Amino acid sequence: MTMNQAATLKEWKNYCETEKGVTAEDRTGHLPTPGIPKVLCFSSGKGGVGKTSIVTNLAMAVSKKGKNVLILDADLGLANVDVMLGITPKYSIQHVFSGEKTLSEIIVDGPGGIKLLPASSGIQELCHLDDSEKLFLLNEFDTLTHPIDIMFIDNAAGISDSVMYFNMASEERVVILTPEPTSITDAYALIKVLSQQYRVSEFSIIVNWSNSKKEAQNVFKQLTSVADRFLGFLSFNFLGYIPRDLCIPKSVRQQKAALELFPACRACQEFEKIAETVLSNFEKKNDGNIKFFWQNLLRL
Ligand SMILES: Nc1ncnc2c1ncn2[C@@H]1O[C@H](COP(=O)(O)OP(=O)(O)OP(=O)(O)O)[C@@H](O)[C@H]1O
Ligand SMILES: [Mg+2]
């Protein structure tokens, strides 16, 4: 049997257990090439700073520009992407692990052409897969029925193991913070752990809930000057800012993206600008030397 012939993870695991001649080396020699070329992981030290709002609206903006976007909802226990977009996924990645569904079957369509991979209830499993499970999942990504150009991860707040895990596996790490001192301190704490314990040296920053671009740039300066002083040489990229704008909570209440309901609002204009920057970085980096998320995440 090959992985492609195994209909579910359970079937593949049973095969691996009974197939004594197949060694881990044999299996790793046949790693498929995952079809996901770019992954941005959105995190924050402090909770409630706007990660899910930003991920859903940016996904919509990027999708409007012709890219196939997948959101991975990785907020363990507090999945919000589906609620914000008004969709009710029946299954999650947990069903892939239990062998009931394939990855293609659990991915749901969201508004504006975006796709959602509901993963929150299976995050613990995703972080603790054995070799045969990792291989199976890699293969599943290779055989997805719809192509994906870019994946956004809506991470949990804080500095838990799963937060680190997704950051490590991603090509670009975006830290979101607000002008509140507590948010700046917590963003610094996240950057400190990622740089000192996990050797991450490049960060993109989005300042949310800002009164002006100037205020956002000051927050960026505050964060980077402390980091420069105490954490050594790190590279920071100001990806943009989102103003405090009532259209965001209004759209959350209606379970729709702000970009759908209020495309002309100030926040949406900034979402569009950030989406353009993300895509132009994407074109620059898309030079064949791509670090694939799933190979990293599921590294054997
Ligand atoms: N720029 C903004 N202007 C006004 N309200 C905002 C803005 N950004 C987010 N909000 C509001 O802040 C609240 C928290 O946002 P959101 O759920 O996106 O944060 P989060 O970082 O994902 O939270 P959690 O850490 O709990 O996952 C929501 O009610 C949202 O409507
Ligand atoms: Mg959230």
Image (cartoon, rainbow, N blue to C red):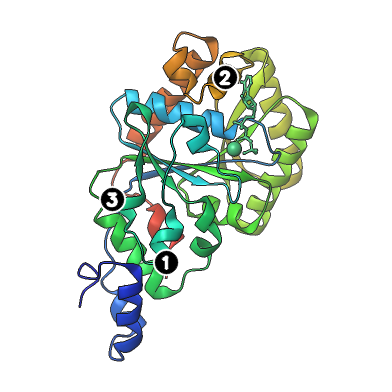
Where does the image place residue 57, in percent across and percent down from the top left?
Answer: 47, 26
Where does the image place residue 42, in percent across and percent down from the top left?
Answer: 54, 40
Residue 83, compared with residue 12, is above or below; it is above
Q: Are marks 3 and 1 in contact (CB under 8 Å)?
A: no
Kind of residue at disc 2: Ile
Please give left or right for residue 92 compared with residue 64 in the image: right
Marks 1 and 2, how far apart at CA: 37 Å
Where does the image place residue 255, in percent across and percent down from the top left?
Answer: 50, 26
Marks 3 and 1, how far apart at CA: 24 Å
Q: Secondary structure at mark 2?
A: helix
Please give left or right for residue 52 compared with residue 138 in the image: right
Labels 1, 2: front one: 1
Kind of residue at disc 1: Ser
Foreground of the two, 83 or 162: 83
Marks 3 and 2, how far apart at CA: 32 Å
Q: What residue sits right under mark 3 in the picture?
A: 35
Q: What residue sits right under mark 2 in the picture?
A: 248
Q: What residue sits right under mark 1 in the picture?
A: 98
Residue at x 21%, y 74% (from the top left corner): 2
Kind of residue at disc 3: Gly
Q: Which tag, 3 or 1, sits closer to the chain's start?
A: 3
Residue 288, compared with residue 272, is above or below; it is below
Q: Quadrant of residue 131?
A: bottom left
Ligand 1 lies under 8 Å from the Cβ of mark 2: yes
Q: Residues within 10 Å of mark 1 (few under 14, many from 20)?
A: few
Q: Residues within 10 Å of mark 2 (few under 14, many from 20)?
A: many
Labels 3, 1: front one: 1
Foreground of the two, 208 or 290: 208
Please give left or right for residue 9 compared with residue 119 in the image: left
Q: Secondary structure at mark 3?
A: loop
